[in-house]
Amino acid sequence: MTVTSQPLDNEPRHEKYYLDPIIFKACCVEDQLFKVPRYHFERNSEIFQDTFSLPVPGNDDAEGSSDEHPFVLEGIEKVDFACLLNVLYPLDIPQILTSTTTDEWISVLKLSTLWRFLDARDLAIKQLNHRVTAVRRVVLARDYHVADWLRRGFTELATRGEGLDQEDVEQLGYTDAVRLYQIREDAIKTATSHKVRYGYEDSRFQDANVEDTFVEDFELADMLSRSYAKIRRLSASTFVKITAHGSVCVQPHLSYGRRIEKEADACTRLSSTIPFRSTSSYARHCHTGPSDGNIDFLAPFVECLADVKDRQESAVEQEERRFT
């Protein structure tokens, strides 16, 4: 055994593979502690990036630093959290994605959407793409803002041979079930008339009726689905931070011979929309779960970043004019 003369604190640390751990506690029906590297939470989730950047009061232990002071995830099922960790920190080499069940991928989609793990969200969508029924695809599309699933699900339900059963109606809701029933009835009448006149049926009438009937639903779904990609594109040129007083600050980064930092006017709107009182409350704010037909704070957040991007481009143009 080799004895070193230097204290351990002075040992050189690898710049890439010296990872800080963090301890989470999932608080729902039954509390459970999890200890994992902070790496993916800091690198791949906007929510946790900003949460971890908050200052820690001088006399308090940082949340997540020990079993006695865990980072509390209120309202999060331990099963859901374990499924997300299985994707972020696979214990098998190589990772076997096909062994993950449909319900486990739905758990990954749920938390990756709430906390904006964009790569994990994309992976969950890809894995679930052909695993779920049309009815479940519609329900998941509404809950987790997957526009393609909503359009595909409604189209399949409107054009398939069998109608909706009682379980389908309960999952979809009365309003959607009635609209689908009306599409199918109208399509039968139109197809019958078309066959009498031209001698063959044409399913395009059903597809057109789906688009017309659910046009507002599809527009909302498209907007929410695109918002995740929009955040991804803007993340390289903007960052979000929480001030010591709990207000949200969105700052663009401009580089034109020198670095320009400018607070966005939309911070006031975000500050009043998203009140945070403690370090983990930023992540907890997203734990309310999906709400059918309602846009959570993601929409104003994306709108704010879009405003910042526009002002950023305008400032660059002004700088260019000054030097030409």
Image: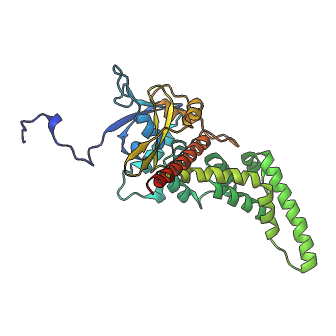
Q: Nearer the viewer, residue 303 or 159?
A: 303
* Total marks in image: 0
In this rendering, the answer to whether 132 lies above or below 37 is: below
Horizontally, residue 262 falls left or right of residue 208, namely left
**How far from the left and from the top, in percent, is residue 160?**
76, 64
The x, y position of residue 78, in whole percent, is: 48, 37
Q: Which quarter of the picture shows residue 132?
A: bottom right
Above or below 125: residue 208: below
Q: Residue at the spot x=43%, y=54% of the render?
A: 323
Image location of residue 164, percent across then percent down = 78, 55
Q: Is residue 28 left or right of residue 188?
A: left
Residue 192, can we see it?
Answer: yes
User: Eyeballing the image, is 166 above or below 155?
Assistant: above
Q: In which quadrant of the rendered image does the C terminus lie? A: bottom left
How is the model colour-coded? rainbow
Q: Nearer the viewer, residue 245 or 161?
A: 245
10 lies left or right of 319: left
For the point 34% across and 30% down, the residue is 65
Q: Position of residue 38 (x, y in %)?
A: 36, 41
Q: Is residue 116 above or below residue 212?
A: above
Q: Nearer the viewer, residue 203 or 132?
A: 203
Residue 104 seen anywhere in this rendered image of the structure: no
The N terminus: image quadrant: top left
Residue 211's quadrant in the figure?
Answer: bottom right
- The answer to whether 208 appears left or right of 144 in the picture is right
Q: Residue at x 93, y 77 (%)?
A: 197
Which residue, as the protein is rendered here, is positioned at the far top? 59
Q: Residue at x 52, y 39 (%)?
A: 264
